[in-house]
Image (cartoon, helix red, strand yellow):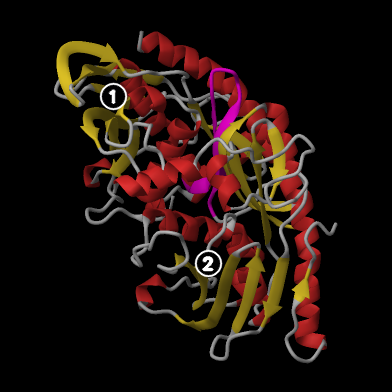
Amino acid sequence: MSMMKNYVVETIRKAQMVQLLANGKRLDERALDQPRELKIETGVIPKANGSARVTLGNTEVIAGVKIATGIPFPDTPDKGILMVNAEILPMSSPYAEAGPPSEDAIELARVTDRGIRESEMVDMGKLSLIPGKTVIAVFVDCNVMNVDGNLFDATSYAVVSALRTAKMKKYVIKDDKVEATDELIPVPVETTPVSVTIARIGDRLVVDPNAEEEASMDMRITITTDDNGNICASQKGEASTITPEQVLQAADVSIKVGKAIRAQIIEATK
Amino acid sequence: MKKLWEGAQLAGSKRKLIDENGIRLDGRKWNELRPIKLQVGVMKNADGSAYIEWGKNKIMAAVYGPKEVHPKHQVLPDRALLRCRYHMAPFSVDERKNPAPSRREIEISKVIREALVPAVVVEDYPRTAIEVWVEVLQSDGGSRVAGITAASLALADAGINMRDLVVGCSCGLIGEQVVSDLDDTEDKEGNGDMPVAIMPNLGQVGLLQVDGVYTRENFQKAFELAIEKGKEIYLMQREALTRRFFGGEAQTTEVEEGAE
């Protein structure tokens, strides 16, 4: 990430990284397709409708869900509203800055949103109350608290965990008016999308790059899969290219790794 | 406001995007492109420029540089700084678009830049800036890949050293059917969009974005179709450049609808 362009990896360390990779090994002793330890804590913000703190190695993200009623978009009058946003806090890294969102922060928010939206994780039809007039709006905001690489996956896992555990008021319609009841119901979740980011260092593909690996990569690709192992979102990043063979290889790795992470997210958000 | 969404509901109704004979709303088969016109060297002031009409897309790309870098602290000591802006004119879409760059445009500018940089020999121009401006005058689905296709021609027109041209094509899904080159309606009402940009001679992929739900098989099919179609458009790019530099006046390359 260009925000991390000032992040310095010592030349000798980078050389060692590349040398190890040639033998299928990584500096932190992970296998090439092994993500870092994932920890998920839910309900960390009681004032939010749902929340999660996710740590992926030393990368830490907190996601909070807020749910309210709103006016639907004109082109989807019978569907609810879902908005996923992400912010890289200035406290998260010595290289982060306050101010308007950087290109990286915008890409992070949009790629995270795309994975959730395109997988149809939330059944938007079920969020409609009075078509064209009132629907349920679900806002998921993410705060990146600490940066150690792979914000894409950590943020996505935080959003998914927060949504899976979120509770919203049950709304009823009386005399063409929407009324909130005291009953709490879960958000209509249909699938559990899992994002897997793969970086290329030299000619090797590694899953879940940490900060020093990101500083040494020339290309990354994020692929999101759903419960059925279907691919529902992807984004190639960084100013370098990928070969068609590597795209297909990355797709297979994402499906495989995604399956294991999905089981872990489901377990943590039961 | 009420009128607005009623109209939208009509437009967004479950009309069939592809009929039982596999023919799409605009008469194309699943693997056909919309008509594409390319013109190189169309702007007076720019160092390089190209104009593309692709379906109803009308997009102008202009290149300035290599030139001095301002502000100076952005200088890269060993290579050129490639700046890229993808922008949609307020009148380019059905509802007026706010002219300020949206988050979508900022992201697209980033992915276009990341698709173009690998093709430019940036090491040949240290301490300079190369600016690529992509202006969408009318938008009709697939504007980022059309923009890349024009931008790489504009870079070539500016005489900037390149490893290859960059050409884009978007493929996607209508239901479970993989289709090439989605138009605006298919993009909005279809089931998936996958813009891909390639360097055809080097066999490299510079841009890949996916949305929609693809089985592993459909993912590969759509991805490989996008590459195949990109190679077809590459031939049109070459022809447009040839006419620009060896055919006198800038001329138009046109491919009739459905021509393969």
Q: Which residues are magenta?
A: A215-238
Label 1 sits on residue: A53
Name the chain letter of the residue that bears numbered label 2: B
Cα separation, mark 2 vs mark 1, equals 43 Å
Name the residue rendered at 44%, 31% in the picture.
A116
Question: Residue B62 in the image: x percent, y percent?
Answer: 55, 78
Left or right: residue B244 versus residue B209 is right
Of B240 and B252, which appears nearest the observer?
B252
SS state under label 2:
strand
The amino acid pointed to by label 1 is: Arg
Name the residue rendered at 58%, 86% in the picture.
B43
Is residue A218 part of the magenta span, yes or no?
yes
Q: Disc 2, disc 1: CB below 8 Å?
A: no
Name the chain letter of the residue that bears numbered label 1: A
Question: Residue A86 in the image: x percent, y percent?
Answer: 32, 40
User: Eyeballing the image, is B228 above or below A165?
Assistant: below
Please tell me the numbered disc located at residue B138: 2
Quadrant where the C terminus of chain A lies? top left
**Mark 1 crowdedness (10 Å alpha carbons): few <14, some 14-19, many ≥20:** many
**Residue at the extreme right of the image, as rendered:** B260
The amino acid pointed to by label 2 is: Gln
Of A37 and B34, which appears nearest the observer?
B34
Specify the quadrant of the image occupied by residue A46.
top left
